[in-house]
Image (cartoon, helix red, strand yellow):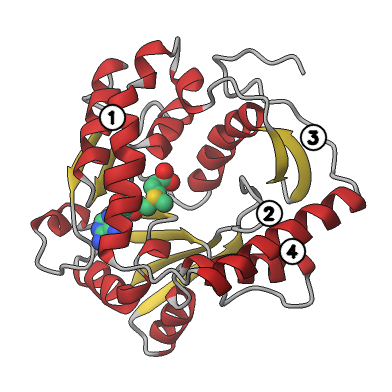
Amino acid sequence: MNIRATDTKAVPTGFAPASLSDKAATYALDAAKSIGRLAMRRVKRTADVVDSEYNLLHWQRTLSEKSWTRSASIVDFIAPRNSASDLRKVDNQICRVAADDYYRYRARALGELLARYTGDATDIIELGAGCGVNLLSLHLNHPDWRLRGFDIAPNGIAAGREIAAYYGLSDRISLDRIDLTDGTDPSYSAIRDKVVFTYFCIEQIPYDVRKVVDNIIAARPKRVINIEPTTELLNFTSPRDIVSFLYIRSVDYQTQLFSTLDDYERQGRVRILARDRMPFAPTIHNDGFLYCWEPT
Ligand SMILES: C[S@@+](CC[C@H](N)C(=O)[O-])C[C@H]1O[C@@H](n2cnc3c(N)ncnc32)[C@H](O)[C@@H]1O
C-alpha cells in the first residue's frame, strides 16, 4: 500500500474485508482464550490492578523507552512501522489489516468521529488520557483545538508531558492528574462548561461506574462523550458480540455505564444526544460504544 508515513490524510481506503474462514478461526481462538482466562485466573479489576497494568507497566515502559525521540513525526510515533496483520474493525467492516495501517487510519477516524459530537468547542478535555496518544491524534486533525488530558497514572502524565514538549506542543496539549473516583479531586473544576470525552477509561473502573458518572455530572461539564466497551449493548445473535462478551467478562471491564446513563435520562438528570457504535477497533473483541450527553 502506498502511504506517506507523515500524513494521516493519506490513509489507505478500501481495506479488504476478511474472509469467512479467517473470521471463524480468529473468533474461535479469541473465545477460547477468554474462556481460558475465565476458567484459570479470574481477573478482579481493582484500582491496584489498574495501577499495575497501566501506571507501573504500560506507561512506565512508554516513559522509559521514549520512542517519540526516535520518531520522525507524530504520525510515526502513534503509528510506528509494524506490519503485524490482524483482524480489526475498519469503517464498520472486519478486515485483516497491518498494525501501522490501522493506527494511521485510526488517528484520522478518531478526529472525524469526535468532531461530529463536539459542536463548536475548541477546548477539549480527555478524562483517562493515559500518555495522551488520543490528544496527539486529535491535534493532527484539529490543530486549532486546545487539548487537556487528565489521568490517575503519574507515569502516563509524565510521558504525555515529555511527548508534548518534544513536539513543541506544550501550549496545545497538557496532562494533569485526576482520580475520577474522587468527587473532591480539585482537577474536576477544570471540566466545568467544557466538552469532555472518555476513551476506554471507564472500562477500567468497573468498581465505581455510578460514582464516576455522578462526579462528572456534579462537575457540570457542557457535554460528555463516553466511548467505552461494554456488555450492555451487545447483540447476542452476532458471533463477534459473543466473542466480545467473553473477552469483556474475562478482563472484568465495566458493564453498567450505558444503562446508568439511560437510567439517569429517565430520572431527568442527563439528556442523551446520541447513541452510536464505534466504526473502528483494533481487535475483534472490544468495540467501543458511544454516548454523547449533557447534564440537565
Ligand atoms: C485503557 S487506558 C486508555 C488511555 C487512553 N484513553 C487511550 O485511549 O490511550 C485507561 C486509562 O484510564 C486511567 N484510569 C484508570 N482509573 C482511573 C481513575 N480512577 N481516574 C483517572 N484515570 C484513571 C488509567 O490510568 C489508564 O491510563
Q: How far apart are marks 1 and 3 (CA)?
A: 33 Å
> Residue 134, how many percent across, how many down?
42, 39
**Does label 1 or label 3 sit earlier along the sequence?**
3
Secondary structure at badge 1 equals: helix
Where residue 256 sits, quadrant-wise, is bottom left
Which residue, given by chain and number where applicable, does mark 1 sit on? Answer: 63
Question: Is residue 127 among the parts visible in the rendering?
Answer: no
In the picture as drawn, the residue positioned furthest to the bottom comes out as 267
The three-letter code of the residue at mark 3 reads: Phe
- Contact, mark 2 vs mark 4 (Cβ under 8 Å): yes
Badge 1 local density, few (<14 within 10 Å), some, or many (20+)? many
Which residue, given by chain and number where applicable, does mark 2 sit on? Answer: 284
Considering depth in this image, is 271 or 76 the residue closer to the camera?
76
Considering depth in this image, is 170 or 114 the residue closer to the camera?
170
> Residue 40, how many percent across, how many down?
53, 70
**Given this view, does label 4 or label 1 mark the residue nearer the observer?**
1
Which residue, given by chain and number where applicable, does mark 4 sit on? Answer: 240
